[in-house]
């Protein structure tokens, strides 16, 4: 998923910011309806540079040097001594994943979820997209810190929403980081904890694949929406989603 | 202690009014050495107001007449899962107040654009003596810091590196921790400086609290509450009552039990200094690459007089510094 720049002479690999479709346009005029050029620079160009540069420095000369951020995050997720590397890999992958599904508002409005996807969303209990959005907003309000929300596909092809605190990844439930046990523990969190405990006890396999990602890190909205602008940002993000990309992430029969 | 749920005149909380910040707001001027005015306004005044409003609204919604101190409210709500929103807002407000209280303006800073080269910059090697000599604070406090951390430079490095290691939201605290409690009796550090309180540095994340005695037992209490609820349900429908066989593991208990047994009640931890390392503090003025620069500036802006005021009175009087 990530493009890496190979330097033939030194035979080293450097993680770099992947080029987005429409990157040049975004750099000069931002993503219409979502980011100004400065906002885009902060959320993508600068932040992705920050992540990939740190990833390069940390993986240089190690077995992870030649791997993509996706491979690195899977490789390091279970290694307790490599969590600093996991952070950059997981963040780089998640951020890229989210930016791939964004487009100008006018183009986004021409796209819509495929019948297949919409059917699965209905199966989750949401009558329409608005209800899914409302649920995402509700989840975002329960997240006190930084994080991500993903719509993921279960092995049985059903969909569910998961919260990932901080640098959590949607690919492996051991590192979803959906529990925030730092302060007071809500009933909701406790239920989730029991669920997780069950999964571990039953040795259940949790293969989820993300379909749609929402970035709730401050980096994603602070330049354009301010420190307290998460709600406004979410609203604009929802109308800048390129559903064609999201549809393509589901396996069509 | 329990929350009084009787309808009384609702007390509401407000954002602390610090005279230095109020003056900056009046003149719309920068917090010299740390924040531009617009950032200060969003970080403290707007965010603070938002938290205060939500907190007061939730207190009314839950018909709670709160105690006068925020700390008490935090203590009362942390173990009540249904009041989690109040707890979260109370903690956010408390942390915001605490952080801004221990800041003061320093020399001017011009906020240059910080680019990706910042990552590749070699760290500046600071001189032990120079850092020590430039650190002009109350002598008792300074001696206490040196006896706890070795030197001012070591203290500074540990404090700022701890803050830098926070990726999401979080706060790095300087705390005073009693030595004569049970948990420290077996610790290898306990004999070094007699029974004096010891200074330590801890990180908390999101709405975490430094006080483990508050934080512990939560899973256990959640479990008990759930059982209570289920029992109530069963009492209503007695015909469905069944004996539920509990799994019994003779060697290891459950996490909840371990948590319950690991009591921290003897500890009373006093926070002296808070450094908010959350990205919202540096992203606006310092940019994505500016975390380290922001923390270096925070170091220059710490108001040590306030830190001194927060130290426990008794200990600072009894304090004697034995250095060998």
Image (cartoon, helix red, strand yellow):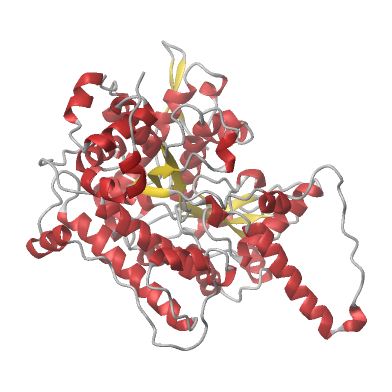
Above or below for A75 versus B109: above
Answer yes or no: is residue B53 visible: yes
Q: Where is the C terminus of chain A found, in terms of image quarters?
A: bottom right
Viewer-nearest residue: A250 or B30: B30
Q: Which image quadrant for residue A129?
A: bottom right
Q: In the rendered view, does A183 fall on the left or right side of A206?
A: left
Q: Is residue A145 above or below residue B48?
A: above
Direction front: furthest residue: B318
Q: Which residue appears at 52% of the width and 83% of the height?
A: B5
Where does the image place residue A19, in percent across and percent down from the top left?
A: 39, 38
Q: How many marks?
A: 0
In front: A237, or B312?
B312
Q: Residue furthest left?
A: B27
Residue at 24 percent of width and 49 percent of height: B306
Residue A16 coordinates in the image, percent (x, y): 40, 31
Residue A184 falls in image quadrant: bottom right
Compared to B156, does A203 lie above or below? below
Quarter occupied by residue B101: bottom left
In the image: residue B40, left or right of residue B241: left
Residue B110: where, in percent of width, then height? 12, 41
Judged from this view, the residue extending furthest toward the top is A9
Q: Is residue A117 left or right of residue A139?
A: right
Residue B182: x and y in percent read 59, 42
Say which residue appears at 51% left-offset and 60% top-offset. Answer: A243
Q: Is residue A239 visible?
A: no
Using the image as rendered, state which of residue A16 and residue A186 is in the foreground: A186
Check the image and report above or below for A45 versus A71.
Answer: below
């Amino acid at each position: 998923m990530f493009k890496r720049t190979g330097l033939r002479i030194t035979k080293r690999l450097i993680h770099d910011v992947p080029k987005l479709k429409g990157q040049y346009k975004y750099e000069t005029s931002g993503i219409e309806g979502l980011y100004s050029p400065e906002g885009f620079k902060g959320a993508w160009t600068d932040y992705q540079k920050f992540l990939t540069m740190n990833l390069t420095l940390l993986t240089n000369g190690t077995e992870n040097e030649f791997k993509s951020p996706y491979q690195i995050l899977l490789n390091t997720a279970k290694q307790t001594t490599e969590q600093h590397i996991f952070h950059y890999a997981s963040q780089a992958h998640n951020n890229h994943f989210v930016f791939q599904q964004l487009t100008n508002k006018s183009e986004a409005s021409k796209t819509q979820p495929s019948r297949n996807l919409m059917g699965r969303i209905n199966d989750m209990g949401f009558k329409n997209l608005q209800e899914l959005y409302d649920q995402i907003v509700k989840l975002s309000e329960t997240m006190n810190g930084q994080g991500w929300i993903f719509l993921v596909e279960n092995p049985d092809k059903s969909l569910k929403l998961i919260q990932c605190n901080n640098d959590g990844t949607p690919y492996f439930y051991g590192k979803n980081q959906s529990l925030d046990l730092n302060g007071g523990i809500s009933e909701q969190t406790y239920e989730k904890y029991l669920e997780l405990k069950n999964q571990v006890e039953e040795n259940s396999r949790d293969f989820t694949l993300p379909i749609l990602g929402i970035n709730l890190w401050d980096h994603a909205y602070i330049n354009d929406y301010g420190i307290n602008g998460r709600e406004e940002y979410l609203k604009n993000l929802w109308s800048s989603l390129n559903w064609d990309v999201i549809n393509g992430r589901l396996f069509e029969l | 202690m329990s929350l009084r749920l009787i309808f009384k005149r609702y007390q509401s909380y407000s954002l602390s009014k610090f005279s230095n910040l109020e003056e900056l707001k009046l003149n719309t001027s920068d917090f010299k050495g740390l924040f531009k005015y617009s950032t200060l306004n969003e970080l403290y005044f707007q965010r603070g107001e938002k938290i205060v409003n939500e907190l007061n609204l939730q207190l009314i919604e839950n018909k709670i007449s709160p105690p006068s101190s925020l700390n008490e409210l935090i203590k009362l709500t942390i173990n009540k899962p249904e009041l989690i929103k109040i707890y979260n807002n109370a903690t956010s407000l408390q942390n915001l107040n605490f952080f801004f209280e221990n800041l003061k303006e320093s020399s001017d800073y011009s906020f240059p654009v910080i680019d990706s080269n910042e990552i590749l910059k070699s760290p500046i090697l600071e001189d032990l003596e120079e850092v020590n000599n430039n650190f002009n604070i109350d002598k008792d406090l300074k001696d206490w810091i040196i006896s706890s951390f070795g030197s001012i430079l070591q203290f500074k490095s540990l404090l700022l590196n701890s803050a830098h290691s926070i990726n999401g939201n979080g706060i790095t605290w300087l705390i005073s921790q009693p030595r004569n409690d049970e948990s420290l009796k077996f610790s290898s550090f306990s004999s070094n400086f007699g029974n004096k309180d010891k200074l330590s540095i801890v990180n908390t994340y999101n709405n975490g609290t430094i006080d483990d005695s508050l934080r512990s037992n939560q899973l256990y209490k959640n479990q008990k509450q759930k059982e209570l609820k289920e029992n109530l349900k069963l009492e209503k429908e007695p015909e469905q009552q069944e004996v539920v066989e509990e799994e019994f593991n003779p060697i290891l208990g459950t996490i909840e039990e371990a948590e319950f047994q690991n009591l921290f009640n003897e500890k009373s931890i006093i926070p002296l200094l808070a450094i908010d390392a959350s990205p919202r503090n540096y992203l606006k003025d310092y940019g994505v690459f500016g975390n380290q620069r922001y923390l270096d500036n925070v170091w220059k802006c710490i108001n040590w007089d306030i830190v001194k005021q927060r130290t426990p009175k008794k200990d600072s009087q009894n304090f004697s510094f034995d250095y060998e």
